[in-house]
Image (tube, grey):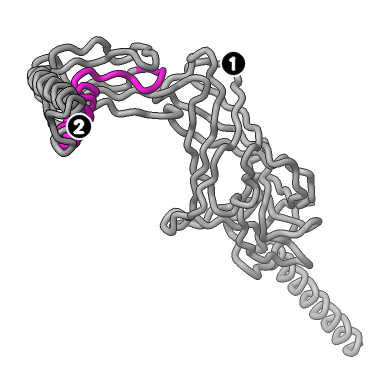
């Protein structure tokens, strides 16, 4: 009878130990972070990029005399359209008039010396000296005339006016600035050095302006600068935009949209990407065999509710999309099925 009681007691003890272990195991499972998973997959992603910049004139001329002089008239205002050869500014002509008088006197002396030489009453040396003096004065007069009546060397629009009639020019600041805006304007953009090989001169681009919502203008890459800024790791490219009607003006805000085709990229749900506190680094937790590993990723484009990844995660990886708060590299987790 005693042996029966001992056997029953032992059975009860074993049963109690088994229940305790099961309870401990259940508690351990309950303590594991609960996560939900998504899948990383390779997709064809359009490689378009948009750059912002301001419009510049295709060609810019600063209208200024070669020497300081007093302004008499300015015939245009900022925003006026001007034609090539149009008179824009006239300056004080006192020096020009004095030089013209000297030029007339020397020209008369030269003609008289030439006539005397023909009848044998003069010398060739006198004629040559007067001819050299006359040529020098003519050059000086023509140069001063060009700097007394200032004309536009191009057709365009006045983008700056820095003086008023009566002011004295100082030589450092132009009186006017004229920008050529037809048939083209240009936009300068900065792109990352990773895209340098994608830029080709002549590549067509689409350009939009806030001033003309809903309209798209044709452009093309006209120049690629062969240097990279070491501090920003960017290079510049010049975009030439057709502007036959002159609607696009210098200073307008522009968006340049580049199409680089498509590439196969790993795409993950946007909820999988977490930002490390105190830095700009992004991470994704990849699940494998009950544990997670923390992978630093390089983001590409946002694609609705997903992200294109340049690096960090492989096709088919299971990624955590819910429950990252309690996670760290190598932590065991339980998956919410």
Residue 47: x and y, percent? Answer: 68, 42
Residue at image point 75% right, 43% down:
262
**Mark 1 burial class by Cα count in 10 Å: few <14, some 14-19, many 20+:** few
In the displayed orientation, state which residue is furthest to the bottom: 3
Residue 32: x and y, percent? Answer: 67, 63
Residue carrying label 2: 131
- CA distance for labels 2 and 1: 67 Å
Instruction: Give the magenta range.
Output: 128-157
Residue carrying label 1: 214
Looking at the image, residue 183 lies above or below residue 317: above
Residue at image point 73% right, 41% down:
261
Q: Which mark, by number, is residue 36?
A: none
**Mark 2 burial class by Cα count in 10 Å: few <14, some 14-19, many 20+:** some
Tag 1 secondary structure: loop
**In-image side of 257 versus 190 (left or right):** right
Looking at the image, residue 219 lies above or below residue 148: below
Camera-nearest residue between 67 and 110: 110
Residue 127, picture quadrant: top left
Residue 232: x and y, percent? Answer: 44, 53
Camera-nearest residue between 2 and 261: 261
Residue 173: x and y, percent? Answer: 19, 31
Q: Earlier in the sequence, mark 2 or mark 1?
A: 2
Residue 208, picture quadrant: top right
């Amino acid at each position: 009878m005693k042996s029966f009681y001992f056997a029953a007691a032992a059975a009860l003890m074993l049963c109690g130990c088994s229940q305790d272990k099961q309870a401990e195991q259940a508690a351990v499972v309950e303590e594991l972070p609960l996560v939900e998973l998504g899948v990383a997959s390779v997709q064809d992603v359009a490689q378009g990029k948009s750059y912002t910049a301001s419009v510049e004139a295709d060609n810019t001329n600063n209208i200024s005399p070669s020497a300081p002089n007093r302004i008499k008239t300015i015939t245009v205002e900022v925003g006026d359209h001007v034609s090539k050869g149009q008179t824009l500014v006239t300056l004080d002509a006192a020096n020009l008039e004095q030089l013209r008088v000297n030029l007339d006197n020397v020209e008369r002396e030269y003609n008289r010396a030439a006539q005397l030489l023909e009848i044998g009453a003069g010398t060739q040396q006198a004629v040559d000296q007067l001819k050299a003096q006359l040529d020098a004065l003519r050059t000086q007069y023509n140069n001063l005339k060009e700097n007394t009546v200032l004309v536009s060397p191009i057709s365009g629009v006045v983008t700056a006016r820095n003086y008023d009639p009566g002011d004295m020019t100082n030589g450092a600041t132009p009186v006017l600035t004229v920008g050529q805006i037809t048939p083209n304007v240009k936009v300068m953009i900065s792109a990352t050095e990773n895209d340098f090989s994608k830029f080709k001169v002549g590549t067509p681009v689409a350009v939009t302006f806030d001033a003309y919502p809903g309209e798209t203008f044709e452009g093309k890459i006209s120049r690629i600068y062969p240097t990279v800024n070491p501090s920003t790791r960017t290079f510049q490219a010049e975009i030439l935009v057709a502007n036959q009607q002159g609607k696009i003006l210098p200073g307008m805000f522009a968006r340049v949209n580049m199409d680089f085709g498509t590439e196969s990229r790993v795409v993950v749900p946007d909820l999988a990407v977490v930002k490390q506190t105190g830095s700009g680094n992004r991470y994704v937790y990849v699940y494998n065999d009950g544990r997670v590993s923390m992978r630093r990723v390089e983001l590409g484009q946002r694609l609705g509710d997903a992200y294109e990844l340049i690096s960090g995660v492989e096709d088919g990886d299971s990624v955590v999309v819910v429950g990252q708060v309690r996670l760290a590299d190598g932590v065991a987790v339980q998956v919410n099925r």
